[in-house]
Image: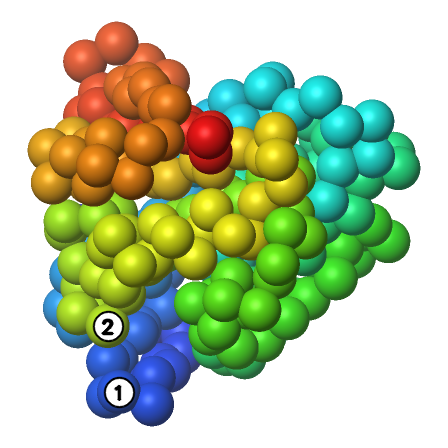
Amino acid sequence: MTESWEELARARTAAGDELILRRRAGIFEIRCNGYDLMSNRAHRSEEALAQLALEELRAPAPRILVGGLGLGFTLRAALHAAPPESRVTVCELLPEIVAWNRGPLALLAGRPLDDPRVTLRIGDIAALIASADRRFDAVLLDVDNGPDALCCAANGGLYSPEGLARLRSALTTEGVLAVWSADPSPNFEAALDAAGWAWRAQEIAARGVAGDPLHVVYTARRF
């Protein structure tokens, strides 16, 4: 008999979007408005988001922004790939997700919030980006399911032409933007082209195993 899901906690955004943390047979999953948002079954592409971006960095002590804490896998991968002198800001909208990462999810990514290089910001990532003014050498954006597969409609602005303009302003001259997407996004690619970004898309197997669903990591540089 299949084990039932155990609901561990709920959270709600100011816009009314509901997130549920649940567990079954060692699998943790966060759902948003009834849709799968993330789980520890398949997080290879979330780690690749950080690895691929940081491979392109030239700064000896990079300042990195991680947009969306999630289950902590992108943050952990960024810390692993970044030099000791780096500084990593992670921005998470919901304090409940931070509490989950320090509670039932803590062991999944090895408590990355405890790393002394990390600064935690609780709030809207869009507002932080808008005020950054060339502060970051890399912005790693894993908010919702990417530019198209949105669970929360308000997140769409991050990937719009206006959002890309704000991201450009948040990056240093040689800064790198990395965006996680559940699927290829022709609309997002067209917006990158129209804004003059140099970009590439790489497909990553969800668990790093042949035959897995493929997610997409976009990396882009400003001109």
> Vertical placement of 16 versus 29: above or below?
below
Q: Which residue sits at x=25%, y=52%?
A: 161
Q: Are marks 2 and 1 in contact (CB under 8 Å)?
A: yes
**Residue 69 seen in this snapshot:** yes
Which residue has dot 1 on it?
15
Q: Residue at x 24, y 72 (%)?
A: 154
Secondary structure under the numbered disc 1 in the rendered image? loop
Residue 58: image x %, image y %? 71, 21
In front of the other: 40 or 25: 40
Q: Callout 2: few (<14), some (14-19), or many (20+) C-alpha neighbours within 10 Å?
A: few
Q: With 89 as the anchor, is 223 left or right in this view?
A: left
Identify which amino acid the numbered label 1 is placed on. Answer: Ala
How many numbered marks appear?
Answer: 2
| Crowd rating for badge 1 (residues with CA inside 10 Å; few <14, some 14–19, many 20+) | few
Please identify the quarter of the rendering in which residue 143 is found.
bottom left
* Residue 51 image-quadrant placement: top right
In the rendered image, the residue lying farthest to the left is: 186
Residue 120 spot, x, y in % from top left: 68, 66
N-terminal-most mark, 2 or 1: 1
Colouring of the image:
rainbow
- Helix, strand, or loop for circle 2? helix
Spatial CA span between label 2 and label 1: 8 Å
Amino acid bearing label 2: Ala
Q: Is residue 125 above or below residue 12?
A: above
Q: Which numbered tag is attached to residue 154?
A: 2
Where is residue 147 shown, x and y percent of the image? 22, 48
On screen, residue 203 versus residue 8, left or right, reads left
Q: Identify the residue at image location x=60%, y=18%.
A: 55
Residues 132 and 107: in front is: 132
Tell me what residue is drawn at x 14 percent, y 51 percent: 149
